[in-house]
Every structure is written in structure tokens, then in C-alpha cells.
Image (cartoon, coloured by chain):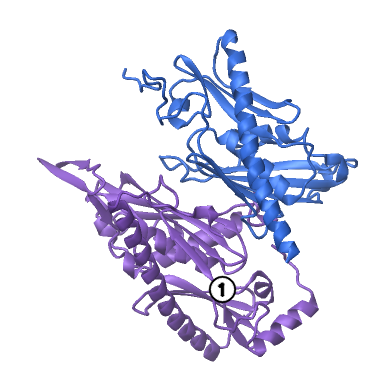
Amino acid sequence: MPSLISPAERDYILKGIECNIRADGRQRSDFREITLETSVVSQTSGSARVRIAGGSDVLISVKAEIGPVQVDPETGDGADKGQIICSIECAPSASQQFEGRGADDLNNELTQMMSRFLCSNNTAISSLSPTCSGSGGIDLSKLCIIPGQQCWILFVDALVLDYGGNLMDAIFMGVRAAIYDTKIPKTEVQDLGDGQFEFEVLDDEEDIDFVHGREDMPICITLNKIGTRHIVDATLLEELCTEAKLVVAVNRAGEICGLQKNHDGSIEPSLLLEMIQVGKTMGQALIKNLDAKIKEEAESDLTKRLQGDPARKLGFFAQ
Amino acid sequence: MSRVELLTPEGLRVDGRRPAELRKITSTTAVLSQADGSAYLEHGNTKVLAAVYGPREARHRTLVVHDRAIINVEFNIAPFSTGERRRRGKNDKRLLEMASFIKQSFEPVVITTLYPRSQVDIYLQVIQQDGGVLQACINAATMALIDAGVAMTDYVCACTAGWVEREAAIDLNHIEESSDTSEVTIAMLPKSGKVTLAQMESRLHVDKLEALFTLAGEGCKQIHQVLDRTIRNRAEELAQKLAV
């Protein structure tokens, strides 16, 4: 990951964007080609790999594990809710700057942002911890097994393997696809009387639940303000010219689920509104496309399985 | 205590292999855009990604050696790589130990004197574990170093061998590894037959050791052929692209 850009190169990118043509031939509102595959890591409950052509590469896994419910000591909230715990890690293979503890700050920033966006109706306290108690579309109460005692905890781990700009969008697309892919075993709760409960996890492969509300999860669109214009899906070099970044999280209904302004520059109020509007429309269109593709893949996997063929995944052999 | 039957009466292992049979190895190089060289390798269900940066200017001036390059290895295990989710910190002793094993097995092979005052970084990321993590990492790192064009005298191929119940077997999977099997990992230079790493963490009768070493050596040679094929295919592909 370069951290410096020459004045000539900056000028070239700036003027190109002014004329609505970028260094790789795209227009301001064009995305690069996105490769998305689900169920790539077999020992997880759900997984996905997202690759943006010539750049960012993110592997996301969701693991469902059983644990105690976490009750907020002040409000008493959360007794009947499951949890989602997010963690984003940038591997040193993505950039030499991520070696050792070099990625800690970025990891923390990304993890917090994701936790917040996935839990849009958070209380102030829970937004300080990476444990979600609200939801970004996901119905957490459906993850509860025995209220006040046991629940499912979804561990969402994102691993950034390669960095080529526009990381946040890639991560969110991946997280949405991985949660969409997540299969949780069904449980059977037995009432033993006098407030005692016992449950059993059904290990039949057909007895599975999907995450409720997975369709309503948001994705995010990052808009980069360069000069007086803004672009989506910035490359590494374009990110270096960016004055201000606006991350807009949006769900399929077109509702804004979160906003975050990053970077050192500022945005005029009128441009800000315009950027949010653009983020909203683009996000909605992208979700529609993604959903169609994910469904298509799930269906083709299912038909293959019914025919007895092993579902072949390309994983890292997809180029 | 019920024990897993590791060897059927017919002499087949839990995953249906014969004792001297490797798991399927699939690999590819140049998977990452930022790294100078990268490789992805699967030994059955063990999946590893390796990235190589350099030779480049050493990051810390104190580490600079004036007549050769230093090799730096960082080894990471994804929290979701095992059945149960487990997060390891950056300073986990086990991770650091593995990194130093890998570093030591490459030091005799990489021609470091060609790159004085510089540093070669090898970053390894384990994505899925099913036994033989160290061997997979060494094999992946070899391929990534070749992909980066770092000068080496030979491949470094690693293979495990272990005494499974009554027979010597190579390339142990997780079930075999975790049921009290004595396991040896060796890394070998396939051309000269020299061993650059030998590691065993359990007890084994000395009479049985030689059989394991020969078997693991055979395994290394087989692995070398598989890796070499991938590298040559890739080189041919690149040559064709140049010719057009």
C-alpha cells in the first residue's frame, strides 16, 4: 500500500475525475468488477469471499456458537437476545504496513464501524463494545435459545487478505453474503418444570435455520470527495487524493442505516445531501444485484447436491 | 475409553488413504495484487495463503546486516480455521515458534548474500486447519518466494510422517494428529536431499525413526513434483503472455 503520491499523479487523477473519466477508464459512478462466492470455508456456519478486480480481497466467516446471554446491567436489555460479535483483521499480506501491530488501529476502526452499522438501534453503552445488542436488520431475538440463559452467538470474522482500495464496501458485501449463507442448527427446548429448561441441538443436516432478517442487512457505499466531485469504488491511488470520505450504509428498502465521515477534509452541506442520495440509490441497486447472484448460487448448489454432485467451489483458484 | 480406529483391518486410514499416500495438493501462485509474490496451497483440507514482500529496504535500521538480507516471517492463524473458534494474539508463543521454524528452514536456501542490507518478508495466513499446518506453510512459502523471484538454491519441500497404530504413514490429517500419534515434520531440499528442518514433539522408539524419515523424504519428493508442475505451468503461461 503506497502512502505517498506525486503531485503530477494527483493532478492527473483530479483532472480525470473532473472530466468524468478515471485512470482505469471508469466513470465516476462505476464500480470495478466484483467477484463474490459463498460457502468457501467448510468448517464455518457461513462464509464468503469478495474480491474487487485488481484489488481488495476479503474472506468472511460466520461461526455460530452457543453461549450465555449478555444482559445490560443498566437497562436489563438483552435477556432474550442472541449476539453478533464482529472482528475485522487486516493480514500483513495486504500491505507491509499491517505487519506486527501496524494494523491494530485500522482493525479497531473497521470493527467498530461494522458493529455499529450492524446494530443500528444501539444504546450508547453497547456501541462502545463490539458486542451488538441492537440489530442492523437481523432479528436477534430469534437467536435466543432459552431466554435469560443460553443463546446463539454469531462470530463474524473478516480477514482482509489484499488491499486495493474501497475496503469497507467489500467487507460489507462479504458480511452480508456470509450471513445470508449462515446455517444454524435447530434446537429443541424442553421444559423441566420450576423454571428449569434443557435444550438439545438437532444435528440433522436438514434441520437448519437461516438468520432471520438477513435480507434486511445493510451494505455500505463509500463515496470519496475528490476536488468538487465524488466517486465510488476508489482505487488505492484515488484514495490518496481523497479529501473526505463518506460511508453510507443502506438496506434494500433504501433506508439509511448508518453514516460515517472519514478522512481529514470537509464536505459542504449541499454536497453532503447529494452524496447521501447517490449512496442510497447506488446501494439499493447493488443490493438487488447481489441478492440475485447469491440466490442463483444457492440454488445451483442445491440442485447439484440433490443430484449428488459435490458443489465445487473455486475459492482462491478463481482469478 | 473408546478410541478412533485409525487403521482399518485392510490397512486403510480414516480418510481412505493408504499409509504412504499424500492428500490431494492443489496450489496456485500470484493470487494477491500488492505482494511481490504470493501462493495459495491446499493439502486436503488444510489451506494456507503465503505472501512475500521484498527484497526491500530493511524496516528497522538496527536489524540491517551489511552483507546479506534478513528473512522475516510472520505467521497467523485465522480465528475461524479450526472447528471451535479461537483467537490467537500477535504474541502467541506458539505462533512465534512456528514462524521461527519456517524462518530457519529457509535461511540455508535463499541466497541472501545477493541482497545485502535488505529484508525479505514472508507472511503466512492459515485459513483452514486439518493437520500438517507447518508442512503446508513451508510449501506455500516456497512457492511464494519463487513467484516473487527471490533467488534460491532449491525448493524447500516439507512433509509429515507419523506412526499410525502399527504402520508408518505420511501427511497426517487432524484426526490422526490429535489421537496421540508421534509425528515428525521434515523439510528437505529435493535436489540434494538435505534436511533443513526436522521436528518431533512426541515420543517414538528410535528403531522406528528411520522408517519415518525415509517415508517423509519420499513424501517431500512427491510434493516437489506437484509444486514444480504448478510453477512450470505458471511460467509457461507468463511466457505465452509475453510472446503475444
Q: Name the residue furthest right.
A: B67
The residue at 58%/43% (across/down) is: B76
The residue at 57%/21% (across/down) is: B201
Q: Name the residue furthest left.
A: A193
Q: In this view, does B52 lie above or below A134?
A: above
Q: Is residue B112 above or below residue A223?
A: above
- Rendering coords of residue A189 (x, y %): 16, 45
**Do we see residue B207 in this rendering?**
yes
Question: Who's blue, chain-wise?
Answer: B
For the C terminus of chain A, the image quarter is bottom right
The residue at 54%/53% (across/down) is: A316
**Do we see residue A71 in this rendering?**
no
Seen in the image, is A185 located left or right of residue B142?
left
Q: Is residue A65 above or below residue A104?
A: above
Q: Which of A145 and B168 is in front in this view?
A: B168
Q: Nearer the viewer, residue A6 or B195?
A: B195
SS at badge 1: loop
Among the 4 quarters of the image, the one containing residue B3: top left
Q: Which of B144 and A3 is in front in this view?
A: B144
Q: Mark 1 lies on which chain?
A: A
Q: Which of B29 and A20 is in front in this view?
A: B29
* Residue named by callout 1: A32
- Rendering coords of residue A35 (x, y %): 50, 65
For the N terminus of chain A, the image quarter is bottom right
- Rendering coords of residue B53 (x, y %): 72, 51
Seen in the image, is A306 located left or right of residue A50?
left
Q: Judge the density around disc 1: few (<14), some (14-19), many (≥20) Cα neighbours within 10 Å.
A: some
- Rendering coords of residue B1 (x, y %): 32, 17
What is the three-letter code of the residue carrying label 1?
Arg
What colour denotes chain A? purple
Among the 4 quarters of the image, the one containing residue A48: bottom left
The residue at 72%/54% (across/down) is: B36
